[in-house]
Amino acid sequence: MILSDADILKRLEDGDLVVDPVDDLELQIQPASVDLRLGREFLEFQRTNIPCIHPNSEREVDEYVTETVVEEGDDFILHPGDFVLGTTYERVEIPPDLIAHVEGRSSLGRLAVVVHATAGLCDPGYRGQITLELSNLGTAPVALTPGMRISQLTFTELKTEAERPYGSERGSKYQDQDGPQASRIQSDDEFGGDQLEREE
Ligand SMILES: Nc1ccn([C@H]2C[C@H](O)[C@@H](COP(=O)(O)OP(=O)(O)OP(=O)(O)O)O2)c(=O)n1
C-alpha cells in the first residue's frame, strides 16, 4: 500500500518516518508523496585523460570526481548530456516497514531533467540525505537552484517489517551519507564481492 498525504503526516508526527526539515507542509506534502529540495553540493566527473572508469578502482572513482558548492543566490547549470550527482537538502529516515522511491517531478521532466538515472530506491532502515543522479536529456542548458523542489519521495508499506534493514548489515555503505556521495562500489569486494565462482 502506498502512503497517502494523511498517512505520511501521521508517520511524520509519530516520528518513526523522518523527513527533515519540512519547512512548508502545504507545499512539500503532496497527495501521496513528499517533495524534496535540492542541496548546494554537486559532484562532477572530470573529463580528463581517464580512458574509462573501472568501477572497482577507488582511485578512479574518487580522484576524478570534483565537488562544487553553489553559493547563495547562484544556480548550477546542467548542460545537455551532463551527468552530475546532487543531493537532497532534506535528510530522511525510513522505518523498517516502509520502502521509499525517489521520483522525478513532472515539471522538471518536461524540461528533460532526470533526477535518478538508474537507482531510485531507499531501503527500509536507510538514514541520510539522498544522492540525486541528475542528467539533462534535452538540448538546452537548465539552471538548477538550490532549495528548488527537485524530486519527490513516495512510501510503500511492506507486508512485514524488514528483518535486516539497511544499516544493520555489513555492506550498507551509504548509511548516514551527508551530501552527494560518489559510488562506493569498490567496497563491494570487502563484503564478499560480486565475483562469480569459477567452475574448475
Ligand atoms: N538515488 C539514490 C538511491 C539510493 N540512495 C541511498 C538509499 C539506499 O537505501 C542506499 C543504497 O541504495 P542501493 O541499495 O540501490 O545501492 P547499492 O546496492 O549500490 O548499495 P548497498 O550495497 O549499500 O546496498 O542509497 C541514494 O542516496 N540515492
Image (tube, helix red, strand yellow):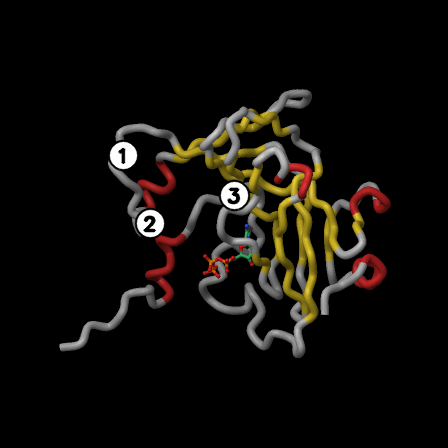
Instruction: Give the amino acid at mark 3.
Output: Glu
Which callout, 3 or 2, points at the residue further toward the start of the chain? 2
Numbered tag placed on residue 71 in the rendering: none
Vertical arrangement, residue 14 with respect to residue 86, above or below? below
Vertical arrangement, residue 33 with respect to residue 10, above or below? above
Which callout, 2 or 1, points at the residue further toward the start of the chain? 1
Mark 1 C-beta closer than 8 Å to ligand 1: no
Mark 3 C-beta closer than 8 Å to ligand 1: yes
- Mark 2–mark 1 Cα distance, whole angstroms, equals 13 Å
The image quadrant of residue 66 is top left
* The furthest residue to the left: 200
Give residue 130's position: percent from left, percent from top: 59, 48
Picture residue at 65% right of the left edge, 75% below the top: 161
The image quadrant of residue 98 is bottom right
* Element at label 1: loop
Vertical arrangement, residue 182 with respect to residue 72, above or below? below
Numbered tag placed on residue 50 in the rendering: 1
Q: Residue under label 3, please give it.
A: 133
Which callout, 3 or 1, points at the residue further toward the start of the chain? 1
Picture residue at 62% right of the left edge, 40% below the top: 109
Q: Residue under label 2, please give it.
A: 55
Instruction: Give the amino acid at mark 1.
Output: Ile
Quarter holding the N terminus is bottom right
Give residue 146's position: percent from left, percent from top: 66, 31
CB atoms of marks 3 and 1 within 8 Å: no
Would you call the spot at circle 2 few (<14 residues within 10 Å), some (14-19), or many (20 or more)?
A: some
For residue 188, side relative to residue 9 (left or right): left
Give residue 92's position: percent from left, percent from top: 67, 53
Give residue 157's position: percent from left, percent from top: 70, 70
* The furthest residue to the top: 73
Picture residue at 29% right of the left edge, 47% below the top: 54
